[in-house]
């Protein structure tokens, strides 16, 4: 994984960089939000490890801004703020995982591994469409749609909107996607999002309301009902 550590405590930052490098990740570190723009010009990381008590722009504001700019990015918040309202604010403003200090390197490594499993790894930023999507070959179009589907949070475009965006019919779009991935677009994204929900609930403490919003449900009760129908249990039971 390409990971960026934003931590103003130099010694702690260096220890974290060393530990993640030993795990095989490509890691960079900075000490403030103000240094971020230059880093993003080099490359967009797959994941951020973010302290909240930063000089200048704080971590909550930074996470909210980055989540809006790069919705596919993974965000682990590491902070001394351990109150319930602090945690809820962290998740509401973009955290995938919220850890409280003091955090052991073992716990941080486990969090990075858990989040890594849910991130599609590629070079660069969130998927960008070519200037003329209608000129894509069938395989290229299917792969571009795949990347769009797995990296979009919240409500997805309809099949008609996708077809119009890529300059083909719904039938052609589905046929190309089935040839590449063995499933229709709707079946694929349904299974993918259910698996993502199951893994996220099992491995993190993200509030169900926020997770439901990220998965495109208009109300958390709709998500809970769909989850129960799929897995035969309520999502909250995975955390008992």
Image (spheres, rainbow, N blue to C red):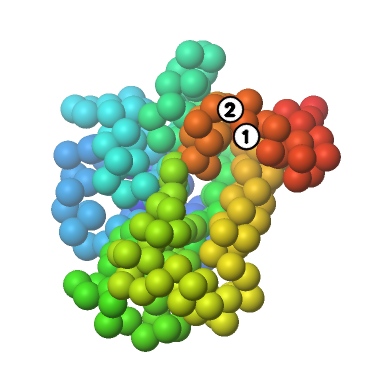
The residue that label 2 is drawn on is 220
The residue that label 1 is drawn on is 223
Give the x, y percent position of residue 29. Answer: 32, 50
Q: Nearer the viewer, residue 237 or 26?
A: 237
Please, what secondary structure does the residue beneath circle 1 have? helix
Q: Nearer the viewer, residue 38 or 233?
A: 233
Q: Residue at left 81%, top 35%?
A: 233
Disc 2, disc 1: CB below 8 Å? yes
Please, what secondary structure does the residue beneath circle 2 have? helix
Seen in the image, is 189 located left or right of residue 236?
Answer: left
Task: Categorize mark 1 by other alpha carbons within 10 Å: few (<14), some (14-19), many (20+).
Answer: many
Q: Residue at left 60%, top 62%?
A: 188
Give the x, y percent position of residue 177. Answer: 52, 74
Does residue 109 lie above or below 132 as drawn?
A: above
Q: Nearer the viewer, residue 100 or 192?
A: 192
Asked if residue 96 shows in the view, the reply is no
Asked if residue 91 shows in the view, the reply is yes
Q: Quadrant of residue 223?
A: top right
Q: Quadrant of residue 222?
A: top right
| Image quarter hosting the C terminus | top right
């Amino acid at each position: 994984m390409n990971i960026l550590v934003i931590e103003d405590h130099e010694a702690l930052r260096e220890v974290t960089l060393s530990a993640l490098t030993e795990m095989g990740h490509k890691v960079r570190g900075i000490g403030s939000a103000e240094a971020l723009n230059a880093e993003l010009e080099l490359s967009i990381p797959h994941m951020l490890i973010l302290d909240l008590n930063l000089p200048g722009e704080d971590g909550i504001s930074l996470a909210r801004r980055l989540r809006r700019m790069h919705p596919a990015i993974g965000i682990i918040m590491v902070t001394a703020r351990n109150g319930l309202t602090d945690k809820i604010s962290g998740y509401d403003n973009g955290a995938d995982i919220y850890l409280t200090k003091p955090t052991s390197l073992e716990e941080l490594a486990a969090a990075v591994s858990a989040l890594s499993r849910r991130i599609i790894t590629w070079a660069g930023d969130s998927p960008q469409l070519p200037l003329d999507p209608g000129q894509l070959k069938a395989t290229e179009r299917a792969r571009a749609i795949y990347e769009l589907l797995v990296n979009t949070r919240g409500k997805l475009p309809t099949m008609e909107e996708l077809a119009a965006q890529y300059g083909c019919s719904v039938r052609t779009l589905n046929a190309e996607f089935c040839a590449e991935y063995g499933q229709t677009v709707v079946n694929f994204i349904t299974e993918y999002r259910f698996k993502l929900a199951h893994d996220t609930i099992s491995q993190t403490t993200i509030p169900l309301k926020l997770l439901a919003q990220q998965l495109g449900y208009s109300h958390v009760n709709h998500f809970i009902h769909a989850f129960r129908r799929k897995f035969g249990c309520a999502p909250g039971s995975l955390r008992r």
